[in-house]
Image: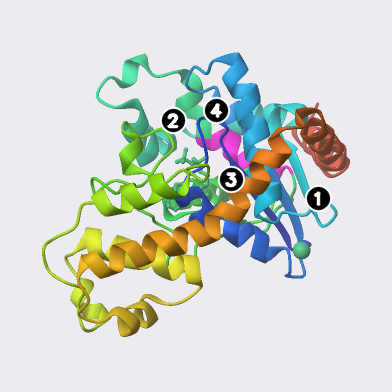
Amino acid sequence: SFTPRVFSGIKPSGGLTLGNYLGAIKRWVDMQDEAMENIYCAVDLHAVTVWQDPHALRQGTREIAAGLLAAGIDPARSILFNQSQVHQHAELAWLFNCVARVGWMNRMTQFKDKAGANAEKASLGLYAYPSLMAADILLYHATHVPVGEDQKQHVELTRDIAAKFNHDYGVDFFPLTEPVIEGPGTRVMNLRDGSKKMSKSGESDMERINMLDDADTIAKKFKKAKTDPEPLPETVEGLAGRPEAKNLVDIYAGLTDQTAEAVIAEFAGAGWGKFKPALADLAVSKLAPISDEMKRLLDDPAEIDRTLGRGAEKARTIAAPILQRTYEIVGF
Ligand code: ADP
Ligand code: NA
């Protein structure tokens, strides 16, 4: 049996969004209170599967770290680092490239979404991304991975890789990791197109709330968010078939740690002219203290780098023996 251990990561490609906050960061903070070791990572090796400006990438990594620290990740209780500083991630990913099958990668919907119509022009790294993600998780024998709904398929692939490795080498070395996808914030949608998830790499800034947006910008974006003309329903069942309405209710629920039922109970029959400003005020009240602290931390990039460096040292003390043992198992 494996020590309960949490691992998760965020790409430093563009600023953090409300989707990242509700689907990942907020839950990572809460999981620090559970009896598990917590390991959180800015996954810069993943970011470069699509070309990144080097200066922006370095800054983006610090921004992720500042966002996590400001939201309440405590480096005394959690290991916080960036992926490229622990070279074992890339080494284990290579072995997993040799375990995973091409057919498995072909079934990954995120690759299809990200590569678009011209998949031949996508980088080989983007295609193999889930294999690196499996390495991120299994390098720490992580048992639990809190992620948004969009990452479910990749965590399932991680289990497939662990199972095939264990089977191929006749060992019981890697755990079958559980995705932790809970609560109303696990699939925050784009404010302009309710069929797409809110993403830091989306086309228009109006479609997402950034964690560093100021109060006026947040209010404007929610005001312009696409909805249908109907008021909020009387019961939560009335959200069926209304993706934009459901999304705004779910965001409200996620920000207040309530269920969608409780939010509907409060706003039953209300018009958007009432709900949207309430949602904007709520988002500002939750995000402003975090973004203020983020900006304060970003004033001292050297201190962020030192925090990440100490985290990487701790991460290596777990990762190095696990990679070493993996190398012995495969015959290196
Ligand atoms: P992005 O899609 O913004 O580039 P990442 O791929 O770096 O974000 O994902 C970091 C974490 O944030 C993952 O756990 C992912 O599932 C979560 N996440 C990203 N977007 C959303 C969203 N719109 N709703 C809920 N969770 C999300
Ligand atoms: Na903990």
User: Which tag is nearer the camera, tag 2 or tag 1?
Assistant: 1
Q: Which residue is mark 2?
A: 102
Q: Which residue is mark 4?
A: 47
User: Which tag is nearer the camera, tag 2 or tag 4?
Assistant: 4
Q: Are marks 2 and 4 in contact (CB under 8 Å)?
A: no
**What is the span of residues highlighted in magenta in the rendered image?**
130-139
Q: Are marks 2 and 3 in contact (CB under 8 Å)?
A: no
CA distance for labels 1 and 4:
23 Å
Q: Give the residue type at disc 3.
A: Lys
Q: Are marks 3 and 1 in contact (CB under 8 Å)?
A: no
- Is 264 displayed left or right of 95 in the figure? left
**Visible in this render: residue 75?**
yes
Label 1: how many Cα within 10 Å (few below 14, some 14–19, many 20+): some
Task: Determine whether the residue tagged by mark 1 lies in a helix, strand or loop.
Answer: loop
Label 4: how many Cα within 10 Å (few below 14, some 14–19, many 20+): many
- Is 72 displayed left or right of 103 in the figure? right
Residue at 49% x, 71% y is 256
Q: Give the residue type at disc 2.
A: Val
In the rendered image, the residue lying farthest to the front is: 216
Closer to us: 68 or 213: 213
Residue at 66% x, 60% y is 29
Q: Which residue is mark 3?
A: 164
Precedes in sequence: disc 2 or disc 3:
2
CA distance for labels 2 and 1:
38 Å
